[in-house]
């Protein structure tokens, strides 16, 4: 597989073309941002952890019936994935109150929910990813009803699979963000990444943060925490 020109550079990843029109290479960086870009820094070897973890979790999800963009890991930081047209929704699933939910709703962090919450944001940096519901997505043509139905079913399935996998590593899945994309034929697949950048992971015994909140909140220890999650999940 020939790596060609850079197509895109985001906050945490770069994307390169390949000699196959339907495949691209994702390259994970150590760069970290928080607070809508207000805080910038790096987390050493984060790119390696996120690449390896995201690939392992996506392979597990494929086995459990959730289609993903994953094709093949190429190196520590690089992975071959199917080229998708990203659906501009941040799809958030919550099991326990935290972060913006706690602020918005006045519910103490750590309060478990009676059932998981599914939430959408419009993925738009200029507008700071505003909170929307599925009627907004339909009205604005961001996704079709069929796509929303598929995304909803996949998101809850991802939650069940990830909760079980993580609990075996003594990690509680508090909440997470997913992104989905369309293949050339319109099929909806899970894309982007699943990592401590995009999930809240708490140690199931101590409640310690094992995710990007350590960086966001200036708590420190984020490099060790990312390594710890990788060690627990991948050995
Ligand atoms: N999240 C993310 N990217 C975003 C916003 C949120 O990956 O741009 C993840 C975040 O890591 C957490 C979940 O989505 O696991 C819910 O985040 P929340 O809405 O509470 O916002 P936050 O407080 O993280 O900004």
Image (cartoon, rainbow, N blue to C red):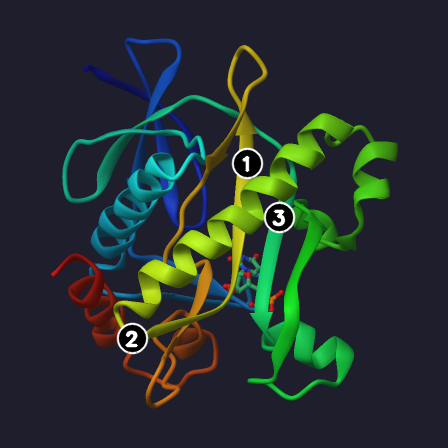
Q: Residues within 10 Å of mark 1 (few under 14, many from 20)?
A: many
**Residue 67 rendering spot, x and y as whole percentages:** 44, 30
User: For disc 1, does the CB lie below 8 Å from ligand 1?
Assistant: no
Cα–Cα span, label 1 and label 2:
28 Å
User: Which numbered circle lies on residue 180?
Assistant: 1
Depth check, front residue: 61 or 218: 61
User: For disc 3, does the CB lie below 8 Å from ligand 1?
Assistant: yes
Q: Which residue is mark 2?
A: 170
> In which quadrant of this rendering is ligand 1 seen?
bottom right
Image quarter (top left, top right, bottom left or bottom right) of the C terminus: bottom left
3 and 2 marks in contact (CB < 8 Å): no
Q: How many marks?
A: 3
Circle 1 SS class: strand
Decide if residue 166 is on the left or right side of residue 233.
right
Decide if residue 194 is on the left or right side of residue 233.
right
Whichever of labels 3 and 1 marks the residue nearer the N terminus, that label is: 3
Cα–Cα span, label 3 and label 1:
8 Å
Circle 2 SS class: loop
Depth check, front residue: 38 or 123: 123
Whichever of labels 1 and 2 marks the residue nearer the N terminus, that label is: 2
Please tell me whether residue 4 is drawn above or below residue 14 in the rendered image: above
Q: Residues within 10 Å of mark 3 (few under 14, many from 20)?
A: many
Depth check, front residue: 78 or 208: 208
**Residue 28 rendering spot, x and y as whole percentages:** 30, 45
User: Which numbered circle lies on residue 90?
Assistant: 3
At horizontal 22% and vertical 48% (from top left) the residue drawn is 52
């Amino acid at each position: 597989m020939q790596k060609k020109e850079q197509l895109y550079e985001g906050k945490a990843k770069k994307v390169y073309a390949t000699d196959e029109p339907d495949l691209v290479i994702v390259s994970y960086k150590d760069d970290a941002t928080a607070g809508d870009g207000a805080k910038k820094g790096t987390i050493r070897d984060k790119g390696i952890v996120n690449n390896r973890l995201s690939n392992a979790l996506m392979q597990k999800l494929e086995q459990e019936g959730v289609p993903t963009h994953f094709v093949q890991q190429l190196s520590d930081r690089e992975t071959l994935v199917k080229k998708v047209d990203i659906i501009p929704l941040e799809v958030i699933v919550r099991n326990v109150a935290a972060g913006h939910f706690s602020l918005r709703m006045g519910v103490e962090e750590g309060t478990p929910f009676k059932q998981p919450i599914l939430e959408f944001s419009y993925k738009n940096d200029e507008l700071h990813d505003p909170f929307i519901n599925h009627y907004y997505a339909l009205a604005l043509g961001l996704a079709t009803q069929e796509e929303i139905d598929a995304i909803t079913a996949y998101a809850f399935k991802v939650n069940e699979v990830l909760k079980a996998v993580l609990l075996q590593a003594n990690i509680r899945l508090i909440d997470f963000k997913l992104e989905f994309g369309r293949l050339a034929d319109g099929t909806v697949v899970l894309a982007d990444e699943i990592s401590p950048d995009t999930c809240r992971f708490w140690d199931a015994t101590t409640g310690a943060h094992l995710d990007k909140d350590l960086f966001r909140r200036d708590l420190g220890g984020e490099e060790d925490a990312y390594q710890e999650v990788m060690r627990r999940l991948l050995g």
